[in-house]
């Protein structure tokens, strides 16, 4: 995407899948547009084997923040990967999922939205909520806080495919500067992957003035303070 537009700040609500593939230097994450074949230059959605050759050709990317180098005050969002996490990234030399984040967990779904009992082992087909704790370590509030949730749904060769569900996004939240908040997803029904009873969820938190950039777009969890993940296994 060229220039700055509202579309790059809040992800377009369309059916998207994200793919993870092993490369020589580590693990990279790539986007595959299921609404067409233009997600990559020269990469057809029917040709998953070409993913490793096009890891740098994402056609649509979130742009730079309007506040970069201009505004004296801005939010600084962090989904803590550990206690006392100050948002320094990357945390590894190569982009990987890293350990499960203590900031992401699961609860039984509650229609009231007030939160239910915490769950260690979500069951495939059950009804749950994904909860994420977000810190704003900046010096300005985030008033357009958005969170989306991507689930590992299948494997294609060495590629883990993460799916973004249009109904699984939380928008319009706010968080004051130097504070934290817990955000709950809409009702989540785990799918697992490839018929298995285990899976993984990647969470991204962002704001108009503090968006995830190319690293978050490619799901580089250990390279982007806006991202975290939690794996699960049904008991």
Image (cartoon, rainbow, N blue to C red):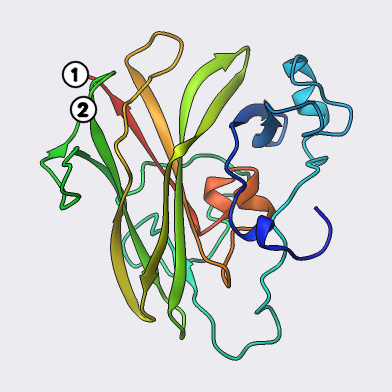
Q: Quadrant of residue 220?
A: top right
Image: 174 above or below 191 = below
CA separation, marks 1 and 2? 6 Å
Q: Is residue 224 left or right of residue 65?
A: left
Q: Does residue 217 appear in the picture of this structure?
A: yes
x, y percent for residue 67:
65, 79
Q: Is mark 2 on a helix, strand or loop?
A: loop
User: Residue under circle 1?
Assistant: 235
Q: Residue at x 64, y 47 (%)?
A: 217
| Mark 2 nearby-residue class (10 Å; few <14, some 14–19, many ≥20) | some
Residue 127's disc number:
none
Nearer to me, 161 or 208:
208
Nearer to me, 188 or 94:
188
Q: Which residue is drawn at 19% across and 33% down?
A: 120
Q: Quadrant of the C terminus?
A: top left
Image: 215 above or below 87 = above
User: Residue under circle 2?
Assistant: 121
């Amino acid at each position: 995407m060229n220039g700055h537009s509202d579309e790059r700040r809040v992800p377009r609500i369309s059916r998207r899948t994200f793919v993870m593939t092993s490369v020589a230097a580590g693990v990279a994450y790539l986007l595959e547009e299921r609404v067409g074949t233009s997600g990559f230059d020269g990469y057809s959605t029917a040709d998953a084997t070409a993913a490793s050759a096009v890891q740098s050709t994402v056609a649509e990317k979130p742009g730079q923040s309007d506040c970069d180098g201009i505004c004296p005050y801005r939010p600084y969002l962090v989904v803590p990967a550990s206690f006392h996490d100050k948002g320094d990234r990357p945390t590894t030399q190569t982009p990987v999922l890293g350990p499960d984040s203590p900031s992401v967990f699961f609860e039984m779904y509650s229609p009231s939205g007030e939160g239910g009992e915490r769950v260690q082992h979500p069951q495939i087909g059950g009804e749950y909520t994904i909860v994420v704790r977000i810190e704003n370590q900046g010096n300005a509030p985030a008033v357009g806080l958005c969170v989306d949730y991507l689930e590992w749904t299948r494997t294609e060769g060495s590629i883990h495919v993460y799916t973004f569900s249009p109904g699984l996004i939380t928008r319009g939240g706010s968080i004051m500067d130097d504070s934290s908040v817990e955000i709950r997803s809409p009702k989540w029904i785990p799918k697992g992957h490839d018929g298995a009873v285990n899976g993984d969820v990647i969470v991204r938190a962002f704001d108009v003035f503090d968006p995830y950039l190319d690293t978050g777009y490619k799901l580089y969890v250990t390279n982007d303070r806006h991202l975290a993940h939690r794996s699960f296994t049904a008991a």
